[in-house]
Amino acid sequence: MTEETRTQGEDRPAVGMLTMELVVAALLFAIGAAVAISSFKLGARWADDGPQSGYFPFYIGIILCICSLVTFVQGLSGKLGANRSFVDRGPLRQVMSVLVPAAGYVLLIQLIGIYVAAAVYITFFMIWLGRYSWLKGDSLGIGVSAFAFVLVEVWFQVPLYKGGWFDPLSFLGY
């Protein structure tokens, strides 16, 4: 693929503005409905001694639902920018190249703990995005995690999460 072809492909819209307007309106409607329903269950009426605990959140949820419906209907009727691009493929690819590994890092923390996950995450980013050698990536990933472990666990004596599957640092007594 030539540079010009790749550049043209990255300039194409990945998601349109209208699509995102409709998706956000639907999500905000769902949030507003959840707030209104749970507030109604708490009590959304005016009692003898004043408003019940769900009174104000209920109406905020209702207002959010109404505004979301208005935005959704405007989008379907063509009053919002249908032709505009929300994000092009190139910038979306850059955002996803950071977002997806960050989500993986959060999952790794749950499985193998924060220190080992941080070492893997730092090493991965240095080698994949930074184009550093394996030696530099591994050295810095392990070094930063080891320093964080000594600083937090040993000096400050604050235990951090070690993992749900197994405790990779149990051989150190922590």
Image (spheres, rainbow, N blue to C red):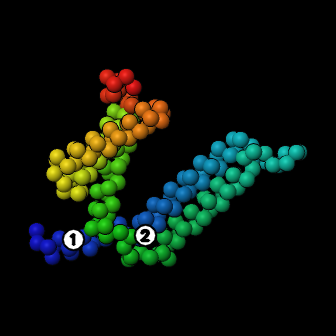
Which residue, given by chain and number where applicable, does mark 2 sit on? 18
Instruction: Note whether 80 is above or below 61 in the view shown.
Output: below
- Residue pictured at 50% horizontal, 77% vertical: 79
Give the x, y percent position of residue 134.
16, 47
Looking at the rendered image, the quarter that the C terminus falls into is: top left
On screen, residue 2 above or below 66 = below
Residue shown at the point (47%, 32%) measured from the top left: 157
Farthest right residue in view: 48
Q: Quadrant of the N terminus?
A: bottom left
Which residue is more in the foreground, 45 or 110? 110
User: Which amino acid, mark 2?
Assistant: Leu
How would you rate the neighbour count of disc 2 (Cα within 10 Å): few for under 14, some for 14-19, many for 20 or more? many
Q: Secondary structure at mark 1?
A: helix
Image location of residue 144, percent across then percent down: 32, 44
Tell me how far mark 1 sits from mark 2, CA to CA: 21 Å
Q: Is residue 10 left or right of residue 21?
A: left
Residue depicted at x 22% and y 48%: 137
Q: Residue furthest front?
A: 155
Q: Where is residue 126 shown, x and y percent of the image?
A: 24, 52
Badge 2 element = helix
Q: Nearer the viewer, residue 113 or 158?
A: 158
Q: Earlier in the sequence, mark 1 or mark 2?
A: 1
134 to 29, vertically: above or below = above
- Across and down, in percent, residue 5 comes to 15, 73
Q: Is residue 108 visible?
A: no
Using the rendered image of the protein, determine whether residue 33 is visible from the camera's viewpoint: yes
Q: Which mark is residue 9?
A: 1
